[in-house]
Amino acid sequence: MNKLGWTIFGAAIVLGTSVLLFWQHYEIQPLLAPQQPAKLIYEAHNRRCDMGGGIPVILKPIDEQGKQLSVVALPSQEMPSRNLEKWLQSIFATRAERTIYVVDPRAVKEPHESSLVDLLMHYDFINQICVIDPQNPPKWYPPPVPVHTKKWY
């Protein structure tokens, strides 16, 4: 190989290395998936769980078999967990205060032991979860049913 050949070979190596380093340094990184904010779980006696004056959405698990969870939305609307997201989304679509109340004795001491609380943690339209202890409920529980409607939302 002559002098011109070595010069071209050396220039190709330098150019290739420069392009590779440039590519690695300025490579566009994929966007990270947005992290959902952690849901806040409070005990219902906490002042953040004060009902205010609105009509609360209160859920109570009634049957838990494996992954199937049935819920009653007090006072008396029973539904399987697969319908819960759509129903709650329709309620919270027009609310500024997006607090949901859960009556579940398992959730009082350890909220993540409750399948219902774990399910609600994945809904991005809920801001906070308030757990009601059935043995020691807050003063406002159970709330009065509105006279003008049989629905609670």
Image (cartoon, rainbow, N blue to C red):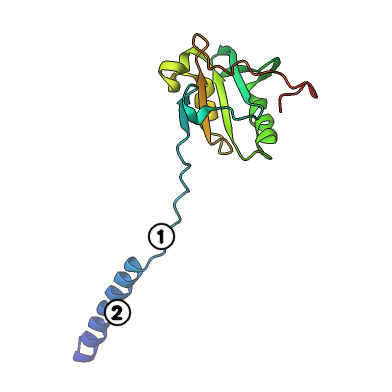
Q: In the image, what residue type sits under mark 1?
A: Gln
Q: From the viewer's perspective, is 99 left or right of 12?
A: right
Q: Mark 1 falls on what kind of element?
A: loop
Which amino acid does the dot numbered 2 rest on? Leu
Q: Is residue 148 left or right of residue 56?
A: right
In which image quadrant can residue 152 be found? top right
Select label 2 or label 1 by which is in front.
Answer: 1
Label drawn at residue 29: 1
In which quadrant of the rendered view does residue 9 lie? Answer: bottom left
* Depth order, front residue of 21/114: 114
For this view, does 31 lie left or right of residue 74?
A: left
**In percent of the image, x 53 and y 36: which residue is there?**
127
Q: Secondary structure at mark 2?
A: helix
Residue 149 percent across, percent down from the top left: 79, 24
Question: Does label 2 or label 1 sit earlier along the sequence?
Answer: 2
Left or right of residue 45: residue 78: right
Mark 2 is surrounded, within 10 Å at the Cα level, by few (under 14), some (14 to 19) or many (20 or more) other residues, namely: few
Given residues 71 and 4, the one toward you in this image is: 71
Is residue 88 positioned above or below 17 on the image? above
Q: Position of residue 30 (x, y in %)?
A: 44, 57
Q: Residue furthest top?
A: 135
Residue 107: give its label: none
- Residue extending farthest right: 148
- On the rendered image, what quadrant is the N terminus found in? bottom left
Residue appearing at x 68%, y 18% in the figure: 144
- Residue named by callout 2: 15
Cα–Cα span, label 2 and label 1: 23 Å
User: In the rendered picture of this protein, how many numbered marks are placed on residues?
Assistant: 2
- Tell me: residue 17, above or below residue 92: below
Which residue appears at 41% of the width and 60% of the height? 29
Q: Residue at x 71, y 28 (%)?
A: 153
